[in-house]
Each structure stands twice: as C-alpha cells, then as structure tokens.
Image: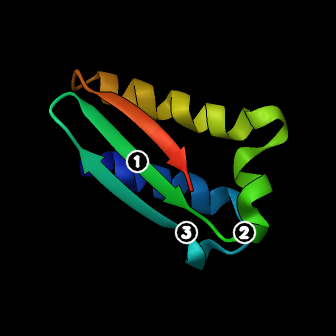
Amino acid sequence: MGYLKDLTLQMARAVVNKSDEVQVEEVEGSSMVVIELKVASDDMGRIIGKEGRVANAMRTLLRTSAAKDGKRVSLEII
C-alpha cells in the first residue's frame, strides 16, 4: 500500500509552500490504513483549505484508491 503514501506526499507537496517539510507515515492494519500527514505550521491552513475542502478532497482520492484493493483508509493531519 505504499502507493497511498506516495499519493498523499504528491498531493500535499502540490498544495504547501514548504514542500521539503512534508512528512507522511503509513500505518497498515488488516483492513484499515492510517495515513499521518505532517506539514509546517505555516502550511496547515493550506492543507486543510477553506471549510476543510482540500483535506476532504485528499481523503476522497485516498478512499477511492484504497477501495480498489478492498482496504479502508483514514487521513490524519497532524
């Protein structure tokens, strides 16, 4: 499921100003994958977006990608 980590990294780097400070961790369980995204504090607003639109769009893309393998995914922004 490393492609979910790569997808999250690419999406986050496209949105933030400090792309070198983006960190993504992937914790995989039997049926659930948790993606932990860490960005610079200055970029937190960019990654969440107005009313959470950017974060929700990222979650939707991750969910559809993981559904192909029968997995569930959760994106946590730290």
- Quarter the N terminus occupies: top left
Front-most of 57 and 25? Answer: 25
- The kind of secondary structure element at disc 2 is helix
Front-most of 58 and 42? Answer: 42
Q: Which residue is drawn at 27% across and 23% down?
A: 68
Front-most of 54 and 76? Answer: 76
- The residue under label 1 is which amino acid type? Ile
Residue placed farthest to the bottom in the image? 20
Location of residue 63 (image quadrant)? top left
- Quarter the C terminus occupies: bottom right
Residue placed farthest to the front in the image? 78
- Residue 8 in the image: x percent, y percent? 47, 50
Q: Residues within 10 Å of mark 3 (few under 14, many from 20)?
A: some
- The kind of secondary structure element at disc 3 is loop
Q: Which residue is drawn at 45% across and 53% down?
A: 36
Earlier-in-chain disc, 1 versus 2: 1
- Residue 5 in the image: x percent, y percent? 37, 53
Q: Residue at x 59, y 56 (%)?
A: 12
- Residue 53 in the image: x percent, y percent? 74, 33
Q: Which residue does the numbered mark 1 point to in the structure image?
A: 35
Earlier-in-chain disc, 1 versus 3: 3
58 over 37 or under it: above or below: above
- The residue under label 2 is which amino acid type? Ser
Q: Which residue does the numbered mark 2 point to in the structure image?
A: 41
Label number found at residue 22? 3
- Residue 26 in the image: x percent, y percent? 32, 53
Front position among marks 2 and 3: 2
